[in-house]
Image: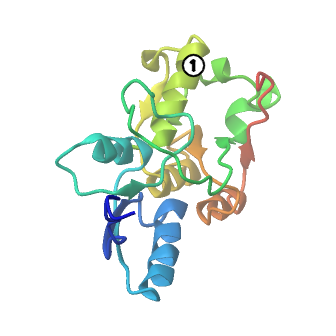
Amino acid sequence: LHDALPISPPPKVIEMAAGLPSGLYYQFGERLKAELAEDRITLDVMETGGTVDNLKLLGDSKSEVDFAIVQGGVADITQYPKLVSIAGIFYEPVWVWYREEVFKSEGGLKVLNQLKGKRVSIGNEGSGTLALSQTLLKISGIAESEIHAQKLKPDDAIKKLNSGELDAVFIVAAAEAPILRKFYSMPGIRLMNFDQAD
């Protein structure tokens, strides 16, 4: 045993990339920070735009980020060959909220092709929502030029949807995310039922 390499003690300061302060990633990070503080470990929770920003920080050798919360399915293994997943935290479906009056004549929003010509928030820069919504639109044969796409943070998207400046909003979030309550409470707003879910 005398030839064995010494095991380094765990770090006392950890940098973790999270997301927007209003989001579940950041709130989870703050809860984890409080728990680690009891073991005298400092967790610095970094505000970012979300998953895509977090992956860039993890992949940057000059970055001090040790851990990050990321949306499953966004990381390309060829771009991040050293990335290791250590835990699943929560299930995050894609939600598409829309103004009922805009799609009333079509019996509601059921397929993504109905978004052509509409004003749609597809997620903020650096977010997993943006990466996923762009992928979903692409595989549905919809070019971004065929919709009036806006890259908004969730709170900004909610305000514009509520004021009638948007027709639909993409958001990827766990069912526990506080932001979803804001959508539920808006009059005339409905959740898309994906006929093309499979």
Residue at 57% from the left image edge and 45% from the top image edge: 171
Color theme of the render: rainbow
Percent position (x, y) of residue 122?
A: 49, 36
Residue 82 % position (x, y): 38, 37
Tell me which residue sits at (62%, 66%) in the image.
178
Q: Is residue 197 left or right of residue 67?
A: right
Mark 1 Cα within 10 Å, few/some/many (few <14, many 20+)? some
In the rendered structure, the answer to whether residue 180 lies left or right of residue 58 reads: right
Numbered disc 1: secondary structure = loop
Q: Is residue 117 visible?
A: no
Task: From the image, tell me which residue sits under label 1.
Answer: 116
Give the residue at the far left of this rendering: 62
Please determine whether, in this image, residue 67 is positioned above or below residue 136: below
Q: Nearer the viewer, residue 85 or 125?
A: 85
| Residue 133: image location, x then y, percent | 53, 31
Q: Does 10 sit left or right of 30 as displayed? A: left
Q: Is residue 30 left or right of residue 79?
A: right
Q: Is residue 31 above or below residue 154?
A: below
- Residue type at tag 1: Lys
Observer able to see residue 75: yes
What residue is drawn where x is 39% and y is 41%?
A: 52
